[in-house]
Amino acid sequence: MYPYFRAVKWAIQARRKPIITEPDTVSKVQCRVWFSDIDFYPELNNGRHLTLMDLGRYCHGIQMGLFKLLRENNWGLMVAGNFTRYRRRLTFLQKFTLETEIIGYDERWFYFYQKTVRNNQIHSSALIRTALTSKEGLVPCKPVVQQLGFTYAPHVPEWVNDWIELHKVSPQI
């Protein structure tokens, strides 16, 4: 089941946090592994990692003022790809922190880096490619960045460029 109550709680908490004034700011959400998050092992399910990361990006967007832009422009959000690495288990009732940041963008895509952290160790991490959509298709990054009050300066880390190139050469991946 989708974590609706958690989504509402996190959204309310995000509204109370400081506004993000720089695009590379890291936002953090304190979490706990609940019964509805675990699989048979009992650890945080791999799919739930990605669902919680979705919620972390929503919270990040709330802190940036993005959701106001979405409403004003009748835009939507989409995920266009991800690369996820699972490193350590998160088991029932363990607390952890979900960290979210935009690590770059180009003309079409925003790239988020997210990780779950417990005791200063990364338990999972993901590179997420996202975009905003309108009835006409993808919304270019430039007007989004400018409407958020940031300086438009497209950049993507080299390791992200490597991931992008891999998908160009190997479309079956």
Image (cartoon, helix red, strand yellow):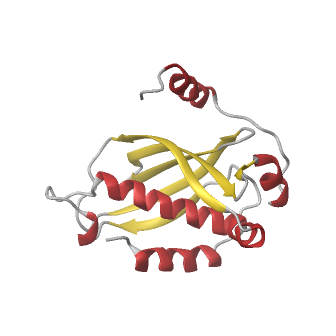
Instruction: Point out the residue furthest to the left here.
Output: 40
Give percent across and percent down for residue 135: 70, 59
Q: Is residue 97 visible?
A: no
Measured from the top left, where is residue 99 in percent x and y? 51, 55
Q: Residue 14 lies in what quarter of the image?
A: bottom right
Count of marks overlaid on the render: 0
Q: Residue at x 81, y 40 (%)?
A: 153
The relative height of residue 156 versus residue 93 in the rendered view (above or below) is above
As displayed, is residue 56 above or below residue 127?
Answer: below
Judging depth in this view, the residue of 59 and 92 nearest the camera is 59
Is residue 40 visible in the rendered image? The answer is: yes
For the C terminus, the quadrant is top left
Q: As displayed, is residue 120 above or below residue 147?
A: above
Residue at (42%, 77%) from the top-left corner?
4
Residue 18 appears left or right of 6 = right
In terms of depth relative to the viewer, which is nearer, 136 or 107?
Answer: 136
Residue placed furthest toward the front? 136
Q: From the image, which quarter does the N terminus lie in?
A: bottom left
In this view, the residue in front, 173 or 118, is 173
**The quarter of the displayed image where residue 57 is located:** bottom right
Q: Position of residue 35 (x, y in %)?
A: 23, 71
User: Going by the image, does 146 lie left or right of 42?
Assistant: right
Of all residues, the one furthest to the top in this rendering is 169
The structure residue drawn at horizontal position 34% and vertical position 59%, both measured from the top left corner, is: 48
Q: Is residue 16 left or right of residue 118?
A: right
